[in-house]
Image (cartoon, rainbow, N blue to C red):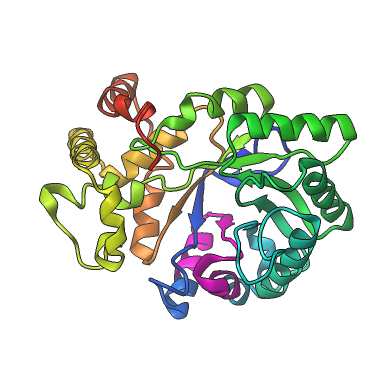
Amino acid sequence: MQYRKLGASGLEVSVLGLGTNAFGGRADKETSIRVLHHAVDNGITFIDTANIYTGTKSEEIIGEAFEGRRQDVLLATKAGIKNGEGPNAGGASRQHIFKEVEASLRRLRTDYIDLYQIHVFDPKTPLDETLRALDDLVRSGKVRYVGASNYSAWQMMKSLAISDSRHLIRYASVQPGYSLADRGAERELIPFCVDQGIGLIPYFPLAGGILTGKYSGGAVPSGSLLDKNPNFARRLNAARVELGEQVARIAAEIGTSATALSLAWLMHQPAVSTVIAGATRESQIDENLKAVELELTEDVLKALDEASKSFVYAPPF
């Protein structure tokens, strides 16, 4: 496994992380625990979840899986998306953040969270309030580092300016959707991250499986995201399917899989600290791990860039 700094922070994270939004849903508890242990046994330290994943089951499963071996993992979770009734059941207010961090700590069976992230930008709460709440959590020891998810470049820059001017904790990372099928982050967010020392944590790195080539020719593989969730069909347009086929062809030419190639491409991009790929089987972890040691030549990177260049300005995935 390779490890990188999370942006300009001192925290070392595995370049391949594990996304857990299927745990307790598409993957039952026993399977999820096996996948978690297999990932960590193979050097993956960065485990990403959220308070809303599978109705809190994801956090609960992770807490059970790592009881007694908490020191082996870096736990990243999130809050901010509405998860209940009432006016304070979502957002980035001090009230919501403090309530949700305590609930996450209980479910994760830990007394600290390595990376606590605001899931979405909250236009109704002053950033000063959000950042002061996060700063207090770090000072209390309940949180080690803080990050944001689904923030735009200007929202991140405004956050950093407030943190710097008020001597508050700074966001160390940002989590956008980013893949060969969704390159919008390259327009503004990645240049911002490079300039400000922010670690980029791509999610949906395989575009829901499209970049594995599994949907070639209109196929609907058993157990796939499309098979389990018909709503995924709205993301499965002809251009993305064709991209998946092109990536598979390039991968075959260099003797690797489309999965490994797509993940390795992200690992070669500026500011990327760790790539969070989901898995519902141990074999998927093994396949994802192939990306870590895959060195891509300039010719391969150029071919991938050419195949996916239209997705720099396409609608987000």
Query: Could you say which is closer to the camera, residue 235 or residue 267?
Result: 235
Residue 269 location, x and y as percent? 47, 29
Query: In the image, residue 309 lies at what x, y percent?
Result: 31, 24
Residue 109, by quadrant, is bottom right
Between 132 and 45, the one nearer to me in the picture: 132
Q: What residue sits 60% from the left and 77% below the top?
A: 64
Instruction: Give residue 307's quadrant in the image.
Output: top left
Side of 297 relative to 36 (left or right): left
Q: How many marks?
A: 0
**The stretch drawn in magenta includes residue 47:** yes
Residue extending farthest to the left is 217
Where is residue 113, by image quadrant?
bottom right
Q: Is residue 153 left or right of residue 280?
A: right
Q: Residue at x 57, y 72 (%)?
A: 56
Residue 48 covered by magenta stretch = yes
Q: Is residue 283 above or below residue 208?
A: below
Residue 177, relative to residue 67: is it above or below?
above
Q: Is residue 178 above or below residue 139?
A: above
* 48 to the left or right of 7: left
Quadrant of the rendering where the C terminus is positioned: top left
Q: Is residue 277 above or below residue 183?
A: below
Find residue 200 and report its horizontal and vertical position in percent: 57, 37
Magenta region: 35-61
- Residue drawn at point x = 72 percent, y = 69 percent: 105
Residue 77: percent from the left, percent from the top? 63, 58
Q: Nearer the viewer, residue 115 or 292?
A: 115
